[in-house]
Amino acid sequence: MTSVFIHNFGCRVNQAEAFDWSCRLGEAGIAVARDWHQADWVVVNACALTARAEADVRQFLKRVRRESPGTRIVVTGCLADKTREELAGNSAVCRVIPNFLKENLVGELLKLTGAGDGRAEKRFFRSRALIKVQDGCDSHCTFCIIPSLRGKSRSRPLEQVVECAREAAERGYKEIVLAGIHLCAYGRDLEPEKSLLDLLRALTAIEELRLVRLSSLDPRLLPEPLLGYLAKEEKICPHFHLSLQHASEPVLRRMGRKSTPAGYLEILSFLRAGRPEAGLGADIIVGFPGEEEADFEFMRDFLKSSPLNYFHVFSYSPRAGTPAAGWKQVPENVKKKRSEELRKLSREKNLAFRAGFVGRALAGVVIKKRGSRLEVLTGNYIKVMVEDGRDLRPGQDVLVRITEAGPALSKGEVV
């Protein structure tokens, strides 16, 4: 039987796309491999957000060609749009599929492989169902190349998302993860116009569904009614990740983001008050052009005193075709030093947050299992290692008591 391995780079949207492809490939009679070494075909869902992301994709392509020269490769994703000619000239790559043709990827694979008989094989199963509800972005921040690669904001019809969520619940998924390039812009392009709040109300009404988790949220598009719903609805995971990017007002203005640190703090404080147990995270860019030492220190102090308990730190990477790429750059050694300082702060804050739950029992879902060892993800985004997994399996709901907060992971026991 023909087998396909899908390797993702980058965002939750790519993960959600891969989840959908995997399910559809299984239904078409193509096996979805768990290891690319055992696959006949490898689909690379590539990212172009940063130079590091691009380098990781190229490194993986070289590795596949070196270690498994007979494996055939299909590349899609943002890097496929950005460097299509380069990838097409790569002898290891059989096909390059741009973003706008992603919806047809499974059909293209069936043509390429000559496989698939329409008989449903054993279904692909992950611990949580990922659903892409929106793609593209209209914001055009001065540092971001994504709008030029993914196009304008486009929302999936609300009824279609609800049906997809119902199907996921019928297949045994208790938690779904909503993904979008600009999730908070959901519904603005629909006719009649909808909103993320409309979608969440419809999804939480599905009785069989236990939890809805949100991917990155834009603080510029979090109106009071939506914030109020997030802070009170029990079916919404108490885990909110915001695309802050920076805290210094001069830097935010240069980024083209109409935000203020006071506005950020108001949102974070509201969520913390409404969901005291919530995991609060943020994306942070360090070393943006014009970032002075005072800007960095302001951001560091803001993050330290804020309710955030973790942040993903990215060193600014110039993207050709964006305004910021042509501006005077912060030296790489300065970016590295500042990034390391914020990552250290993030580790410290996250450890303190997790330590506050030692002795408490939290609801979670099994996301990995190796032998009797489990990895459980709680609703508020704490990963807990459990030694005695007994007959539990990925995707299963559990109640886990946290016994220890280690430097990287927490430990616990199923109760």
Image (cartoon, rainbow, N blue to C red):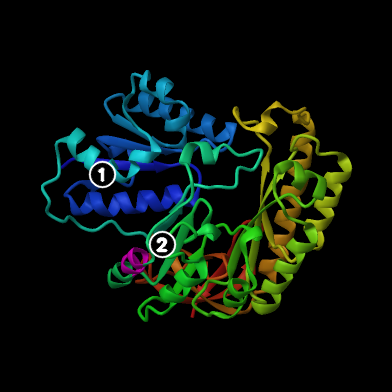
| Alpha carbon separation for disc pair 1 and 2 | 28 Å
Read off the residue under disc 2: 191
What secondary structure is the magenta-colored segment mainly?
helix
Q: Which amino acid type corresponds to the residue marked 1 in the rendered image?
A: Val
The answer to which quarter of the image holds residue 208 is: bottom left
Q: Please tell me which residue is depicted at 58% across the width and 69% down the height of the picture.
A: 380
Classify mark 1: residues with Cα within 10 Å, few (<14), some (14-19) or many (20+).
some
Q: Please tell me which residue is depicted at 48% across the width and 45% down the height of the picture.
A: 152
Magenta segment boundaries in residue numbering: 159-165
- Taking depth in this image into account, of 320 and 377 the one nearest to the observer is 320
Q: Is residue 82 above or below residue 390?
A: above
In terms of sequence position, does the residue under pointer 1 or pointer 2 come before the other? 1
Q: From the image, state whether disc 1 or disc 2 is nearer to you.
A: 2
Q: Please tell me which residue is depicted at 55% across the width and 60% down the height of the picture.
A: 184
Read off the residue under disc 1: 106
- Residue 228 drawn at (x, y percent): 62, 77
- Residue 297 drawn at (x, y percent): 86, 48
Q: Is residue 221 above or below residue 210?
A: above
Extreme-right residue of the structure: 294
Q: Taking the image as drawn, is residue 379 in sight? A: yes
Q: Please tell me which residue is depicted at 53% across the width and 29% down the height of the picture.
A: 55
Is 372 magenta? The answer is: no
Q: Which amino acid type corresponds to the residue marked 2 in the rendered image?
A: Glu
Q: Taking the image as drawn, is residue 406 in sight? A: no
